[in-house]
Image (tube, rainbow, N blue to C red):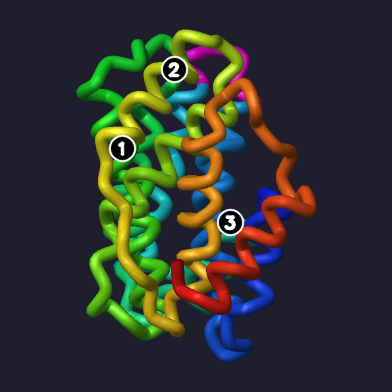
Amino acid sequence: MADLDPDRQLALVYVPASKRAAVETLWRLDAAFGAVLATGTEPMISRIRLAWWREALEKLDTAPPPAEPLLRALAGHVLPCGVAGAELAAMEAGWAAIAPGERLTPDNLARHGAARGARLFELSARLLGDESHPVAQAGRHWALVDLARHSAAQDERGAAFLAAGAVETRGRWPARLRPLGMISALARRDRSRGPERAERPGSPGRMLRMMRHRLTGY
């Protein structure tokens, strides 16, 4: 299964043990989608791999998972918590919007923010047991900032940061959702610093920012 970055690994430590496997598996699905694009050498092959994941996730609603570790983990940990395979499959559209060969237009950036970020945050909130807090905007913002952090081209980084800047993410996070809020707080920090002052994942400054959010909800 795809590895999680140090920031999300630290956030997982603060997820209750009874929910940790489900949240971790969901986040690893997001990382797996990212790995498809990061390791793809041909645009068409990347699209085929994304489509395979979408179809395999949809089939989880009607059939046992195949012998693929992440699909089995999703079936064992995430689906029993009230998340459908079709909801997971819908995340693929966010990655298809930025697949190789696609331009980072405002439309594609909006699709990425919504289908990847907003959905990931909403499903994470469901697994954490609190859907009362509006997390979709924070998810959009996080996805766009994360895209900027991982973009090699300066114009792409700028476009993603600009799109993230149009998304409002203020407000205090409830205690149950603070493991999720931790990575949202890092995204706000990253956008305020800009691409020229990017920090490596797991750096002391990032860890301190996460701890402050854990204590205050901001």
Residue 186, percent from left and from top:
55, 51
Q: Left or right? Give the position of 170 relative to 161.
A: left
Q: Nearer the viewer, residue 10 or 95?
A: 10
Name the mark nearer the viewer: 2 or 1: 2
Q: Earlier in the sequence, mark 2 or mark 1?
A: 1
3 and 2 marks in contact (CB < 8 Å): no
Q: Residue at x 41, y 78 (%)?
A: 127
Query: Which span is picked out in magenta?
Result: 39-45
Task: Identify the residue under disc 2.
Answer: 158
Q: Is residue 107 magenta?
A: no
Task: Identify the residue under disc 1.
Answer: 93
Q: Nearer the viewer, residue 43 or 64?
A: 43
2 and 1 marks in contact (CB < 8 Å): no
Say which quarter of the image contains residue 110.
Answer: top left
Q: Nearer the viewer, residue 155 or 71?
A: 155
Task: Identify the residue under disc 3.
Answer: 28
User: Around disc 1, counting alpha carbons within 10 Å, would you say few (fewer than 14), some (14 to 19), or many (20 or more)?
Assistant: some
